[in-house]
Amino acid sequence: MSLEYSSVDSVKKVLVYGGTHGNELSGVYLIKHWKKHPVFIKRSSFETILDEANPAAVKLCKRYVDTDLNRCFTDQILSESNPSEYEKQRAQQLNAQYGPKKSPSAIDFIIDLHNTTANNGVSFVVEDSADIFIMQSCAYVQANLGAPCRIFLTEDYPAYAVCSMAKHSLGVEIGPQPHGILRADVTLTMKRVVALLLDFTHLFNTGHEFPPTQVDDIFRTKDRVDFPRDAQGDLNGVIHPSLQDNDWSRLNPGDPIFLTLDEEVITWPGVSSSNEMYVAFVNEAAYYEKNLAFWLCTRESKQVAGLRRGATDVEK
Amino acid sequence: MSLQYPSVQKVLVFGGTHGNELSGVYLAKHWKKHSSFVQRSSFETILEETNPAAVKNCKRYIDTDINRCFTDEILSESNPPEYEKQRAHQLNAQYGPKKSPSAIDFIIDLHNTTANNGVSFVVEDSADIFIMQSCAYVQANLGAPCRIFLTEDYPAYAVCSMAKHSLGVEIGPQPHGILRADVTLTMKRVVALLLDFTHLFNTGHEFPPTQVDDIFRTKDRVDFPRDAQGDLNGVIHPSLQDNDWSRLNPGDPIFLTLDEEVITWPGVSSSNEMYVAFVNEAAYYEKNLAFWLCTRESKQVAGLRRGATDVEK
């Protein structure tokens, strides 16, 4: 086997989730639509499963009922006995059905569809940059979509998301879209991204070799920045206009980040490391309660090994 | 011709009528702590959080939309169980009764929308010269377009309808649950102009007769396409999305199915030119409203002056 190439088992099942957050509507409605019209997501070399991750939240058009399902896939929560929260029960149910998380019987590939109020454009949430299948899938979409796609790399943090059950896990975050509405531009872009990911998987399964490649626009999560708050914890300022909508841009010490309602500017003091820092997920509605105005990331490129399908049972 | 109105003693600024429309929520909180911005010497400015439980939960409402609770029917219901109806009764007792001689003079109710409205005013009565002249004043001084969304052909049900003079301020686009600086600071400036106008009025300034443009009169509601189960079957078409206040012609695309088939607008039987408003507002999905259809008009508005004060009489 060439050292330049990684051999990965073929993919038998791809699970596409919508409605992990019930008010992120692109995924919710694409899943509903594809359940009725599955031709678009069918490929001959694997089975595509469509599932609504949080049906109760979807019904209420809320992010969650008791607790955020997309934080429930930690080893701790998955092994909790008799949790009272709806989402923890649901997580355990899904883990039994499609996992167990990261075990040999876990489903091969999960694509989890999300929207954000941040001006992310198309972004991929990647838990493990050593997963060549995932990195090559992102590179494939980057090369074929016709719009920038960034990788939001969370590997320095413990995995807790729905898609982390799978052997290969990928979150797809597309914004900006207000929660509770469908924008045509965002939703059709998500449709195209899913098609490309399924095409990639089919090419991979049918023997196509993806050469080693450099993957750019990888933003590695480093630190969280909260809004300014008063002694009671109430917001004391808003995202500064020069930061608003500028996701993925570089932030320099002294740059404005917040504006008080008296229109005083609050600037970023910088960090002690010498790394250049970049911002992501600027002004996401769901993060206000998580005390997060934006993420700080470093930016990198990575040499990714080539990818080929491992020998099939027939071939062995 | 000039009309005389009694001077304004109290202006009530509401934030948080919908708990997730954050510009008004946070401006009202901010001004409660730093009130000099909203004070004028000729009247009292009251700041109020309309729906505190919804604000606490960052939700539009708890049980029912408080901004639909100010109908005569609901206000006279005995012992309603819904939180918002109880709150409406409480507010109506405190600041009303609705449209009675003891009702508060002027309510400004602050809202955001996910639609690309820019700055818009929700006006219940175009015969209210004080309100029409206040809108004209902001139109002339803000430096950005301000449209009037005229709901007078429909029964009044909103929070601000308690007052003698009622004005909704709707500014978008802003996703519910976030604060955008551009939208929030614009709302701040709009409120300042409305308070300045009231102060000028109170201190004897005469506002000449004027033509008010960009009045969009609500005519009809258009729902999303839905399947037999009531689920959405399409999205706002890209050529309609973000084009609030634009003219809609028969045959124009309005929706796109998820199979990317175009659905066009068939038109209406009247010969009126129709315009769209509130295109793709999140809160209206459950109200079966994808966008409003309106006619567009201009109106000659009488001049305005303050009536003789008790001292002057």
Image (cartoon, coloured by chain):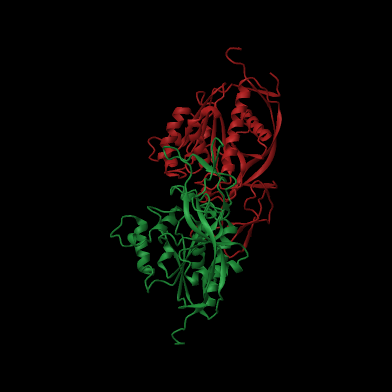
Chain colours: A red, B green
Q: Is residue B49 above or below residue B44?
A: above
Outermost residue to the left:
B78
Q: Is residue A13 above or below residue A242?
A: above
In the rendering, at what x and y percent does residue B118 appear?
Answer: 57, 58
Residue drawn at x 42%, y 70% is: B164
In the rendering, at what x and y percent does residue B27 appear?
Answer: 52, 63
Residue drawn at x 43%, y 33% is: A92
Q: Is residue B305 above or below residue B171?
A: below
Q: Quadrant of residue B85?
A: bottom left
Quadrant occupied by the C terminus of chain A = top right
Position of residue B308 in the picture relative to residue A84 (left or right):
right
Q: Is residue B308 visible?
A: yes
Position of residue B120 in the picture relative to residue B61 (left or right):
right
Q: Is residue B40 visible?
A: no
In the rendering, at what x and y percent does residue A37 appear?
Answer: 50, 30
* Front in this rendered view, residue A150 or A229: A150
In the rendering, at what x and y percent does residue A12 appear?
Answer: 54, 22
Quadrant occupied by the N terminus of chain A = top right
Give the number of callouts. Answer: 0
Position of residue B131 in the picture relative to residue A119 (left or right):
left
Residue drawn at x 55%, y 35% is: B259
